[in-house]
Amino acid sequence: MSGFFDAFGGLALALLGAGLAAALSGVGSAKGTGIAGEAGTGLLCQDPSKFGKVMILQVIPGTQGLYGLVVWFFAIFRMGLLGGDGLPDLTVQEGLQYFVACLPMALGGLLSAIAQGRVAAGSINILAKKPDDWSKGMVLCITVEFYAILSLLASMLMIINISK
């Protein structure tokens, strides 16, 4: 076991961090879009003409999954996995750096997508009761999006600054 950890421990930690960024952000987006979709189906049963606006509100919590995938891709690119030169030789310290760098997107993506799904569901309720004010619900959704963008930015800046 010690030999495995010495040989692959850094790479394993780095891949775990990158994988968590993609997976947890994706889970959050699935949950968030599901919450908004449930609210949207109720409205669409009553008024199918609002499909376009409901779809926009439902899609918004899905952006975190995309941000997580961007962090995953950028991390594996920086690790050297896409160069075609075989597995990179990362120290445990370098692996920990990648792991920690991916955590803001992993946790920020998970939690902000779920929160944004709840806000989007509330915004669909605005659309149902006051259709002319639906853009106010969009602004509320964008407020939550700001924190997902901060998570993306934090992870990207940390990954960029990992020295090889």
Image (tube, rainbow, N blue to C red):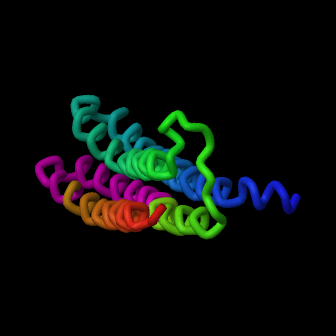
Outermost residue, top side: 48
Residue 162 picture location, percent across and down: 45, 65
The residue at 28%/64% (across/down) is: 146
**Residue 54, image x, y percentages:** 29, 40
In percent of width and height, residue 117 lies at 40, 54
Q: Is residue 55 left or right of residue 74?
A: left
Above or below 36: residue 84: above
Is residue 74 one of those drawn in magenta? no
Q: Nearer the viewer, residue 134 or 66?
A: 66
Determine the main secondary structure of the stretch shown in magenta. helix
**Relative to the observer, which residue lies in front, 27 or 58?**
27
**Residue 35 shows up from this direction:** no
Asked if residue 135 lies in the magenta stretch, the reply is yes
Of the 4 image quadrants, the one containing the N terminus is: bottom right
Q: Position of residue 61 (x, y in %)?
A: 38, 50
The answer to whether 49 is drawn above or below residue 89 in the figure is above
Which residue is rendered at x = 26% and y = 47% of the image?
128
- Towards the viewer: 134 or 88: 88
Which residue is at 28% across, 55% downward? 123
| The furthest residue to the left | 132
User: Could you tell whether 149 is left or right of 71 in the image?
Assistant: left
Q: Is residue 40 visible?
A: yes
Q: Which stretch did the figure color magenta?
A: 108-137
In terms of image quadrants, where is residue 12? bottom right
| Residue at image location 49% in from the left, 38% down from the top | 82
- Give residue 47's quadrant in the image: top left
Residue that sits furthest to the right in the current view: 1
